[in-house]
Amino acid sequence: MCRLFGFLVVGFACVTAMAGSTLPDVVPDRVASRTYVIHGPMGHPSPENQAFINNPAFVITNAGVVVVDPGSSVQIGDMLLRRIAEITDKPVVAVLNTHVHGDHWLGNDAIYRAYPEARIYAHPNMIAEVANGAGDQWVDLLMGLTDGAIAGTRVVAPTSALSHGDEIRVGDVRFRIHHTGKAHTLTDIMIEVPEEDLVFTGDNASNGRIVRMDDGSFTGNLRALDLALDLNRKVYVPGHGQSGGKALVQAYHRYLGTLHETVSYYFEEGLSDFEIKDKAGAKLTEYADWVGFKSELGRHVSLAYLEVEAEAF
């Protein structure tokens, strides 16, 4: 829902953005007492899914709604706001962006148009990357991949920095921030919500989908997942795929760990990354039906090879 707050221009922007949207509404899943997740489709950005591929989420506190990763466009953000309004009349007061990949945060635009006073948080590294043009690059990329389905989306950058060990309180709910260095990217935060016994992992964990690692580190991502598991929470919300318990984090840890160990072993044996790909695939049959397995495996082996090579010198 668009809130005017006495500023007609903001209300007009919201109505305009929503008028062009054909994105169907998706029913949120209640994963904890006050936490809802809209589990997005599992594919890659396309005209068919209109770049909706992540898990927009929200936590309802007694002081307002906190959104986590509102999606990749103003259209997806508007859909999220419509679903929030069906559950509560509380305003959105804060947004948390888990990392710099645009499929997770370009929906900030919709939140800003509806709630311009809401604070938007991210890790300082993400704030810096967006300031250096990462948001514009993501808009251009997703426009091309979706044949313009995200048209009208503006880059609304996070401006409030959160680093490892920080905690913010919104009403009766705390949000603890965890950052272990370079993991899925250099910008990742995981968000622990003690009152909900829950962790938002961002793309440090994925469930049923293999995500890109072009900006990441396999050993760093494993460290982040070790921390997530040590938190020992009941519910984990991954960046993609269904939410669940510790098993989903353990499964993704197993994928990354097995791949890195396999590449390390055969690197020592003198094999090239091309020669290692099939050997790694044979050890990862558990993931053969995950979205992106075939398309990402060779790239992951090559990236892990470069990482192992760098570690050797």
Image (cartoon, rainbow, N blue to C red):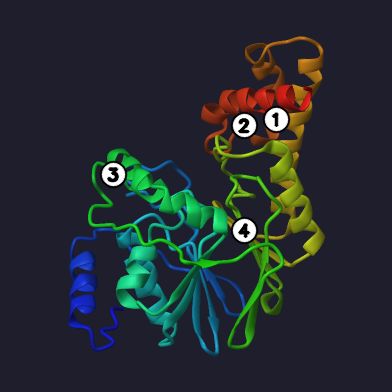
Lower position in the chain sequence, tag 2 or tag 3: 3
Q: Are marks 1 and 4 in contact (CB under 8 Å)?
A: no
Separation (CA) of disc 2 from disc 3: 30 Å
Q: Are marks 1 and 2 in contact (CB under 8 Å)?
A: yes
Residue under pointer 1:
284
Q: Label 4 is placed on what type of residue?
A: Ile
Q: Secondary structure at mark 4?
A: loop
Q: Which quarter of the rendering shows the N terminus? A: bottom left
Q: Is residue 110 visible?
A: yes
Separation (CA) of disc 1 from disc 4: 27 Å
- Pick whichever, 243 or 309, lies toward us: 309
Q: Can you say whether 145 is above or below 177 in the image?
A: above
Q: Label 3 is placed on what type of residue?
A: Met
Q: Secondary structure at mark 2?
A: loop
Q: Are marks 4 and 3 in contact (CB under 8 Å)?
A: no
Separation (CA) of disc 1 from disc 3: 33 Å
Residue under pointer 4:
189
Identified at 48% across, 62% down, the residue is 69
Q: Secondary structure at mark 1?
A: loop
Coordinates of residue 275 in the picture (x, y in percent): 67, 11
Separation (CA) of disc 4 from disc 3: 26 Å
Q: Describe residue 95's horizontal placement relative to residue 153 as left or right.
A: right
Mark 4 or 2, closer to the camera:
4
Q: Can you say whether 101 is above or below 276 in the image?
A: below
Identified at 65% across, 35% down, the residue is 287
Q: Are marks 1 and 3 in contact (CB under 8 Å)?
A: no
- Say which mark, if any, is on residue 306: none
Residue under pointer 2:
288
Lower position in the chain sequence, tag 4 or tag 3: 3
